[in-house]
């Protein structure tokens, strides 16, 4: 791995090569990830990857180019600069060329754990072992992963940033011949992961899912567990609270309007101790807490430098880099404010409805309403008279996520949350369970 001082020296060297000929920024990203995967209750794969890339973003007279290399020798770096100038000269002028982040301080965040950065295969195997053993002989599958991310940034406006963060995840299922249950846990520290607890949760769901019955599609009151809510939140962020989507008139968000139930407050906070982010984005802009919904009222959008300039706003520190300009500035450290209920209390208040563990294969149908279709999996249960009465086979839903959280639609929010998995990946949101008045299921096992 490249030492921090080496990365800073390379970044400064590239900036010096560009000099006053153009605006430029350098991103040196690196780190390592290691994955211990298990299936049929046995570890069958342990892989590790070290990575480093050097990216030069250059803009001259509104013409921009982005070039990358994995080499750091003098010849390669000189070629990188020459290539950037050659490519920029061929590009059309961008009327919204964002300019550079000025020199400014970035917040100090501590999302790094030395033990996670140095985690061994044996340590991950211990987490897997306790997960598998908790199933009492059920067939188990899943993974335990540790990741370290390192980033060095520099630009010709004298902005300099460095940061490092870690993440550890255990995710798995226990299976019977006809049912499955899942559990997921994520933290900056591998030591926080409790494989046994997650294994017991997954096994209990799988056992409870035996002898599932088909259920007629229709609109049902629902209790959605955290992974479902994680998917809901990231879809809202990607398609709604995205400054690029707003500029292109694809966003549902109307700042100041009561678009959600008054119980819903959502913010993006890369600086929260539970987040996995650095204190700056890939444009060198400092990150901060960004309110998205307050007591049901939409507050605004996330911006990178380009979308902010087009909107006449300021960057909120959500630049994802040139390679993801097409996606726009997506909030990816989402926190839904907890309520005052337990999941058990919410279930007890349902006359007839469904408890849903996870969503799967979700696809947007209408970005303007965040109308989404997807499936349930790994534990869906019928609730009758305040008690879980039967497991049900997987159902397809077609539902506007905005409408589902609309005024008077939220009946309860769990008093605690957890870092959730989602259809966009793990670690993007901290989500409690939700009790919603209605969710539209449009298909079942029979079609």
Image (cartoon, rainbow, N blue to C red):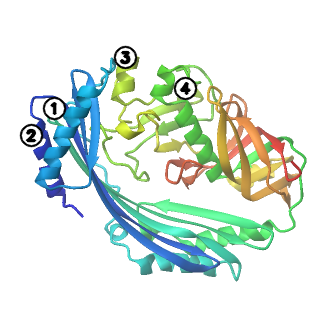
Q: Are marks 1 and 4 in contact (CB under 8 Å)?
A: no
Instruction: Nearest to the eye among marks 1 and 2: give it.
Output: 2
Task: Name the residue beneath numbered marker 3.
Answer: 312
Q: CA distance from mark 3 to mark 4?
A: 19 Å
Task: Name the residue beneath numbered marker 2.
Answer: 16
Task: Name the residue beneath numbered marker 4.
Answer: 298
Task: Name the residue beneath numbered marker 1.
Answer: 157
Could you tell which of marks 2 and 3 lies nearer the N-terminus? 2
Depicted 286 relative to depicted 272: above or below: above
Numbered disc 3: secondary structure:
loop
Could you tell which of marks 3 and 1 lies nearer the N-terminus? 1
Residue 129 falls left or right of residue 88 = right
Residue in the image at 47% along x and 35% along y = 327
Q: CA distance from mark 1 to mark 2?
A: 12 Å
Give percent across and percent down for residue 360.
Answer: 67, 51
Q: Can you see residue 100?
A: no
Depicted 113 relative to depicted 383: above or below: below
Numbered disc 2: secondary structure:
helix
Could you tell which of marks 3 and 4 lies nearer the N-terminus? 4
Residue 392 occupies which quadrant of the picture?
A: bottom right
Q: CA distance from mark 2 to mark 3?
A: 31 Å
Q: Image quadrant for the N terminus?
A: bottom left
Instruction: Nearest to the eye among marks 2 and 4: give it.
Output: 2
Instruction: Nearest to the eye among marks 3 and 4: give it.
Output: 3
Could you tell which of marks 1 and 4 lies nearer the N-terminus? 1
Numbered disc 1: secondary structure:
loop
Give percent across and percent down for residue 303.
Answer: 40, 29
């Amino acid at each position: 791995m490249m030492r921090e001082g080496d990365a800073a020296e390379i970044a400064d060297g590239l900036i010096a090569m560009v000099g006053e000929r153009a605006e430029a920024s350098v991103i040196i990203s690196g780190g390592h990830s290691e994955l211990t995967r298990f299936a049929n209750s046995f570890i069958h794969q342990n892989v590790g990857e070290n990575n480093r890339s050097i990216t030069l973003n250059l803009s001259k007279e509104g013409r921009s180019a982005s070039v990358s290399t994995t080499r750091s020798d003098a010849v390669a770096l000189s070629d990188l600069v020459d290539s950037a100038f050659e490519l920029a000269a061929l590009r059309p002028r961008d009327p919204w060329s964002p300019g550079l982040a000025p020199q400014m301080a970035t917040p100090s965040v501590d999302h790094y754990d030395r033990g996670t950065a140095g985690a061994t295969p044996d340590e991950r195997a211990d987490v897997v072992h306790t997960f598998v053993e908790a199933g009492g002989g059920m067939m188990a599958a899943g993974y335990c992963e540790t990741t370290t991310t390192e980033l060095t940034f520099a630009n010709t406006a004298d902005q300099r940033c460095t940061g490092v963060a870690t993440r550890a995840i255990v995710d798995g299922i226990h299976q019977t011949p006809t049912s499955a249950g899942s559990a997921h846990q994520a933290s900056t520290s591998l030591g926080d992961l409790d494989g046994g607890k997650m294994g017991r949760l997954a096994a209990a769901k799988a056992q409870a899912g035996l002898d599932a019955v088909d259920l007629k599609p229709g609109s049902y009151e629902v209790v959605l567990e955290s992974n479902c809510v994680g998917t809901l939140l990231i879809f809202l962020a990607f398609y709604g609270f995205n400054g690029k989507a707003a500029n292109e008139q694809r966003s549902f968000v109307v700042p100041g309007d009561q678009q959600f139930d008054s119980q819903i407050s959502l913010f993006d906070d890369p600086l929260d101790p539970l987040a996995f982010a650095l204190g700056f984005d890939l444009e060198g802009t400092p990150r901060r807490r960004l309110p998205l919904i307050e007591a049901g009222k939409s507050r605004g959008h996330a911006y990178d430098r380009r979308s902010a300039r087009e909107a006449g706003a300021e960057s909120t520190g959500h630049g994802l880099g040139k390679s993801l300009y097409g996606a726009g500035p997506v909030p990816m450290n989402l926190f839904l404010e907890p309520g005052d209920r337990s999941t058990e209390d919410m279930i007890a208040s349902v006359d007839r409805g469904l408890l849903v563990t996870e969503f799967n294969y979700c696809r947007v149908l209408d970005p303007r309403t965040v109308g989404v279709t997807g499936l349930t999996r790994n534990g869906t249960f019928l609730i009758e008279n305040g008690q879980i009465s039967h497991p049900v086979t997987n159902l397809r839903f077609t539902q506007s996520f905005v409408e589902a959280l609309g005024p008077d639609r939220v009946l309860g929010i769990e008093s605690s949350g957890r870092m959730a998995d989602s259809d966009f990946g793990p670690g993007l949101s901290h989500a409690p369970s939700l009790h919603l008045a209605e969710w539209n299921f449009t298909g079942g096992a029979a079609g």
